[in-house]
Image (spheres, helix red, strand yellow):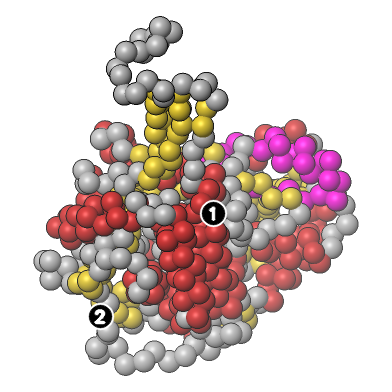
Amino acid sequence: MTEQIALTPPADTTSPPTRLMLVGGTWVEAVDGDWRDIVSPGHRGKVLARVPRGTGTDVDLAVSAARAAFPAWRDQHFTARQRVLLKIADAIEARAEELAEVTAVDTGNALRTQARPEVATLVDLFRYFGGVAGEVKGTTLPAGAAQLQYTRLEPLGVVGAILPWNSPLMIAGFKVPAALAAGNTIVLKAAEDAPLSVLLMAEICEEFLPPGVLNVVTGTGRTAGNALVEHPGVDKISFTGSTEVGRGIAGRAGERLVHVSLELGGKNPSIVFPGAVTDDLINGLLLSSRVTRQGQSCTAGTRLFLHRDVHDEVLDRLATRLGELKVGDPLDEASDIGAVINETQFNSIQEYLEEGLANDSLKVEQGGLPPSDGPLTEGFFHVPTLFSGGNNEFRLAREEIFGPVVVAIPWTDVDDVVRMANDSAYGLAAYVWSQDIDQAITTAHRLEAGWVQVNQGGGQVVGQSYGGYKQSGIGREVSLEGMLAGFTQTKQINVRLGHGGTTTPPATTKTGS
Ligand code: NAD
């Protein structure tokens, strides 16, 4: 049975602190004066803070500030932007523990297993994009002595970046330093359920950035998010969130022909080939399942395809490891798993569990419904659950549960498991586990996913190309190539040389289309 850790008693909730939005270098309330309570995932009903409920008016002000700041930010030598990004990385690192604690409280992600690593990734991302800022450069065509034909990679302008709640800092790190390094300015829309760590990050950034270069708006998706997507002053929407919302955003972005990139949901296969069942394999499966993030990860490998030769042993050992994990207060160093973000998500996971429990084909190897008494009932806590006897057709194997629920599915034939793995509307991540590296890589090449890991299950690392296939997204992040493709546009400049400014075209000039 998964161990429960006693929760720290909630502090006095009578006067939650307020946190403001960053618009044009000033910390402001919403123009309407409305507020939204941010509720603790770890303590039902505890209000952590109040943040402004931003509307279209606030978005409008933030976009104006970003537009005003754009030319000066764009026109600097790249080393100026680079210096700023590197200073921000140092400043974030200096306040890493504070940021990690706010993340743990705000998102419910456990401090040791998730919140601290997330801040470390944020630091790495600022350093990485600061480091490659000089790579935003064009090409020169060998067009002869009489021509100078070259390209410039220019920033898009104002980027509207929309964040989800599951790992706000890491995903802010996928967008903010990349967009800034390329010379864009930003309006960031924090997730309504977890804006606090992003506001703290903005406070740190603000010390080094000119006013208006980074603006942060809080509020709901329906009002603030929607206003950002539809604002004519926004040149690019960079969205991370659910496929459903992403589809709507893509439609509206398409109507006004604005740049858009989407990082969306996933239901990721994890394929285990026959071979020795080592501790390394079990630990890797645990990591890739993202149960220590309450399964609230778009890259969670929760469709676990186990070859029949190793099926029983892997199940047995994985169930044992899952049972050893400690669920509890996100701030407690002993907690491996924290709390689910909110009641809606908690109930949604519970519905999937109930469906699994009611399915005679499925067997619970570990976990099940959340405890009905004890300290974990004080927050939105689920225990990690492993079902065996799964079938790729089951709803539990097809839909993104976004909870700590793994469904094991047996297989014998490679073609069959590849077909099942690819039989999904999603195509974000995949995992292949095999001691036969030829077999592993061949399989990786056959999988319809934007990111395949072989014999490892960790998170995104700086510099890698990250993005989804199929309904998991459009566009790439985290890498230099992703930055160039996602946050710049190409201008071709053709100059006629050696004619003293005369306008007579050379005899060979053709008319264009
Ligand atoms: P969500 O789609 O509900 O919300 C994401 C963001 O979009 C929030 O800031 C929300 O306020 C905003 N939003 C909602 N409706 C909007 C609208 N109509 N117009 C503009 N903005 C709107 O997602 P979530 O529940 O916050 O996050 C979980 C989802 O995010 C999961 O599906 C997960 O897989 C996905 N995700 C994907 C990645 C990735 O890199 N591919 C990473 C993390 C999370």
Q: Residue 171, can we see it?
A: no
- Name the residue nearer the viewer: 6 or 485: 485
Q: Residues within 10 Å of mark 1 (few under 14, many from 20)?
A: some
Residue 438 located within the stretch drawn in magenta:
yes
Q: Count the labels in the image.
A: 2
User: Horizontal and vertical percent for residue 274?
Assistant: 85, 49
Q: Nearer the viewer, residue 95 or 273?
A: 95
Q: Which residues are magenta?
A: 422-447
In the image, what residue type sits under mark 1?
Answer: Val
Identified by mark 2, the residue type is Thr
Taking the image as shown, residue 136 lies to the left or right of residue 270, namely left
- For residue 392, above or below residue 84: above
Q: Which residue is mark 1?
A: 132
Cα distance between the residues tagged 1 and 2:
37 Å
User: Which mark, by number, is residue 220?
Assistant: none
The residue tagged 2 is: 18
Residue positioned most to the left:
32
Q: Answer left or right for 59 relative to 420.
A: left
